[in-house]
Image (tube, rainbow, N blue to C red):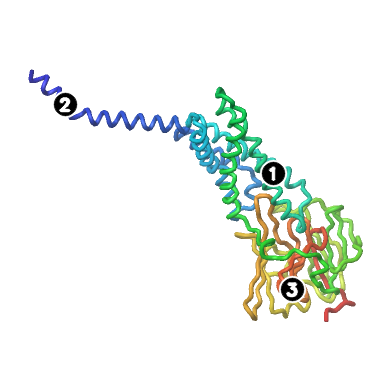
Amino acid sequence: MNSLVVWMDKVGREGPRRAAALFDNRVERTAAMRFGFKSRPLLFLVLFGIVAFPLHAWANGGTPLMWTTSLHLLFGNAIIGIGEGVLLAWLFSLPERKCIATMVVANYASAWLGVLFIQETVVDALPMDLTNEWMWFWGMVAATYCMTLLLEWPFIARCFRGTQDWFRRSVRASLVVQSVSYILLFGWYWLASDTSLYSRMNVVASADLSLPESVLVYFISPADGDVYKRQLTGGIKQKIFELNSTNIGDRLFIRQSRTDSNRWDLVASVDIVWPCGRYVDVLTNMMVEAVPDRSGSRTDPADYGKVQSLGSATNSHWEFRTRFWPKKELQARNKTTSESVRFSYETFFGAWVVRNAVHLPSDKVLFQFGDDQICAFDPVRRRVGLLWKGRGPVPVIEKANVEQ
């Protein structure tokens, strides 16, 4: 009898603890089954994503958009998939665990296929430039939404498999669920993008910029890779050197002649793949009135920092700077009034870097925008215009054309 009493007392004391332990274990197993993974597979997924992340996504490293994209591709798809799965199960009375697992897979598949297809194929093939980029941007927003519906519908249809009227219900579910998630995802990328080029500036024709007539521009033509020259205000371009450039990173710069301190050499920087590259003499011993900065201290144009000045622009009240980190932008500041203007363009569907910027007489800036757009910027009227297609522009003032 005493043994029975002791045993009952032990059960009374330990029973609740064992029940609690069993309940905790059951909750852990249920959570693992519900979300479809445990700690080790999740760690493997994260490590695999970091290793497999395409190198082109890091080309914009340091910008908010780069981090937004990486977080979306690595972790955001899991969160979106869980949210879509819960919403799908709740609205259409489907098994929650099946919906969550299916939509997580669907989001990873559609996101990675979308990035590879859109950024590597579609965007590069579209004839985008300063004059039509904004139209293409909204067109791509609509196209990616339709692409999401197309890619993820088979996964949603799988969740309805075996139910009555599954096709019609799956189409309706796809429209509802994808619309909600796409709006949220668009907001996520919009917050990290910079479209001040179109929201703060006026994109105009080159004739509306009132550019100085005395400036001559040397540049590389993207059509044949050779070096041409033409007047800044327009006219027929003239080939001066057969360079056969094929690299979008090739550019021109000007430096003081090695043989005559009063003359200048036009040089092409080509095939630049760090730490290698080569320089090609295009023109030597040039007699010009003014070149960017006239210092000869630089052997290659900088992609960021203070913009070089040409001729009388060295006495201007305006100063210009280009930035690469954290945003690829062109900045203007009036030293007298402290007025400042800036713009850049970086979205998921395209990003343009400012290169070879030069401060011209009459307070305009000549620069390369993106891969092959030679543009000009007027900070006073906040105007930006596409002049012509080309790379690595170098403006000079010839001896016979002294800027008044």
Q: Secondary structure at mark 1?
A: helix
Q: Position of residue 183 (x, y in %)?
A: 58, 47
Could you say which is closer to the camera, residue 344 or residue 156?
156
Q: Residues within 10 Å of mark 1 (few under 14, many from 20)?
A: few
Q: Amino acid at mark 2?
A: Lys
Say which residue label 3 marks: 309
- Point out the frontmost of discs 2 and 1: 1
Q: Quick check: marks 2 and 1 in contact, CB under 8 Å?
A: no
Q: Image check: 382 left or right of 20?
A: right
Q: Is residue 94 above or below residue 297?
A: above
Q: Residue extending furthest top?
A: 1
Q: Amino acid at mark 1?
A: Ala
Q: Position of residue 389 (x, y in %)?
A: 82, 58
* Residue 254 in view of the camera: yes
Q: Which mark is residue 90?
A: none
> Image quarter for residue 231?
bottom right
Q: Amino acid at mark 3?
A: Ser
Pick the quarter of the image with the C terminus.
bottom right
Q: Secondary structure at mark 3?
A: strand
Say which residue label 1 marks: 143
Q: Secondary structure at mark 2?
A: helix
Could you say which is closer to the camera, residue 338 or residue 242?
338
Say which residue label 2 marks: 10
